[in-house]
Amino acid sequence: MVDSHVALMCFCMVLTVVLLGSLLLNGDRSSRYTQIFLGMLLSNLLFLGADAISWFGDKRTDAFYSQIGMLFQYLTGYGLLFLYCWYLLGRLDRWGTWRWVRRVVLLLCGIGEGLTILSQWTGLFYMAMPGGGSQRGSGFWLSNVIALAALALVGGGVLFCRKEFSQRERWMALMYVLLPVALLFADLVWNALILMGLGTTLILVLVFVNIQLHRDRRLREQDKELAEKKIAIMLSQIQPHFLFNILGSIEWLCETDPPRAQEATDELARFLRGNMDSLQSTKTIPASRELEHVRCYLNLERIRFGSKLRVEYDIGPMDFFLPALSLQPLVENAVRHGVTKREEGGTIQVTTSQTALYDQVTIRDDGVGFDPQSDREDGRYHVGIENVRSRLAAQCGGSLFIHSKPGIGTVAQVRIPRNGKGQGKENDNANYRGR
């Protein structure tokens, strides 16, 4: 019986190590929940090891091993209980669960560990027998009651917040509470300590599977969000009215200025090719290539608006990388919502500069401006800005700052950290031709 129990504990230890390795290799170690779960796995490993040592002492009729094994089994058991409750309460933080519950759970586990240490002399929870092995003490029931009280508090939090859970989350949270409660009752009533290590391991396997399912679901949601953002970018950058107006202007130039019409057609082809390529790009691109795309767009808009739209370039350093289509939405906003809203038109300035910390691109217009605190009527404005801001942060650690005053104009500034993760290795083959 002893040998089979030790073998079972070793199997559970191997399974715990596998979970630990998988989480370290594939998990998000920056997540607080992952860190707590790693602590749970380590505590379970120590709990199983202590249980194996205790049974090893029983086999050798060595009271020392039995006493040390039981001591660390109880201590690591309470540590595992606290981390488990902390993990469950952490999942409820989104609903404002009371922090005092965590403090009470910590107090209960602390009391349990204190009484465990006293049991070395009082025999309250357990007693090591002179000839090896151990037996329950007169206050053994209290050790399980302490654990049940901690789980009851967590279960109360789950029930209190049940309306805020989805049906799946509600059942999973209740299962997380009820399974260890069932194990504790089995140990209390039927002396089922042999199943405690196996039970804790299986519960952790269940938690691990749920973590992986949640991770997979989150990745699918992120992929869906990315696809939606790409579609939003495409719709924002290739709008039918823009193409209709440009094609109408080219048609007019074909009759009045054929060479200029040919040049405009070339610019439109470059512009459309740049938009299509960007939808398949997951890496940052050279700043010169993005500026070339901006130039194509502004040249096309100048065909439409003539002298009403003036463009100035002050291009300095371009030895940095940024996400594709991160500048054109800003320039488009300067045209559509800025200078062309003024009867006399205005000027757009595109500038690149460099500091010790950042590479910067500044897009300035002297258009009508807007109040940053008020909502814009055109929802696409916010879609484009938020797309730019999120992609800058995700792909190169960059940031976007926008300052505007009604009647004065708007300044949009992109900052790329000079040691940012997006400063890639792609070759710069673009030829910037500012006009």
Image (cartoon, rainbow, N blue to C red):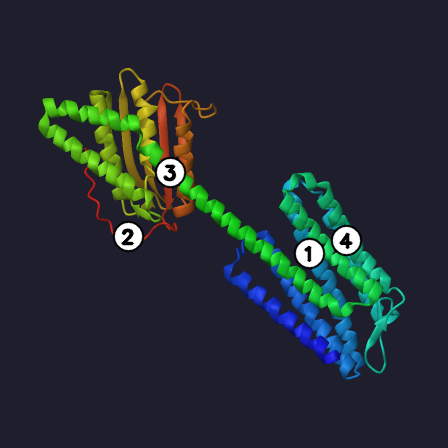
The tag on residue 201 is none
Residue depth check, mark 3 versus mark 4: number of the one nearer the observer? 3
- Image-quadrant location for residue 384: top left
**Which of disc 1 and disc 3 is earlier in sequence?**
1
Q: Which residue is mark 2?
A: 426
Q: Position of residue 82 (x, y in %)?
A: 71, 56
Residue depth check, mark 3 versus mark 1: number of the one nearer the observer? 3
The tag on residue 84 is 1
Is 9 on the left-hand or right-hand side of 112? left
**Which of disc 1 and disc 2 is earlier in sequence?**
1
Q: Which quarter of the rendering shows the N terminus?
A: bottom right
The tag on residue 231 is 3
**Which of disc 4 and disc 1 is earlier in sequence?**
1
| Above/below status of 144 relative to 103 | below
| Above/below status of 241 relative to 423 | above
| Above/below status of 252 relative to 284 | above
Q: Amino acid at mark 1?
A: Tyr
Q: Amino acid at mark 4?
A: Ala
User: Mark 4 touching mark 2, by CB under 8 A?
Assistant: no
Query: Looking at this view, is 427 or 171 the one in front?
Result: 171
Q: Which residue is mark 4?
A: 150
Q: Amino acid at mark 3?
A: Ile
Secondary structure under tag 2 reads loop
Query: Does residue 303 appear anywhere in the picture?
Result: no
- Image-quadrant location for residue 29: bottom right
Distance from Cα at disc 3 to Cα at disc 2: 25 Å
Query: Looking at this view, is 311 or 47 the one in front?
Result: 47
* Mark 3 Cα shell of 10 Å, populated few (<14), some (14-19), many (≥20): few
**Which of disc 2 and disc 4 is earlier in sequence?**
4
Q: Position of residue 425 (x, y in %)?
A: 30, 54
Q: Amino acid at mark 2?
A: Glu
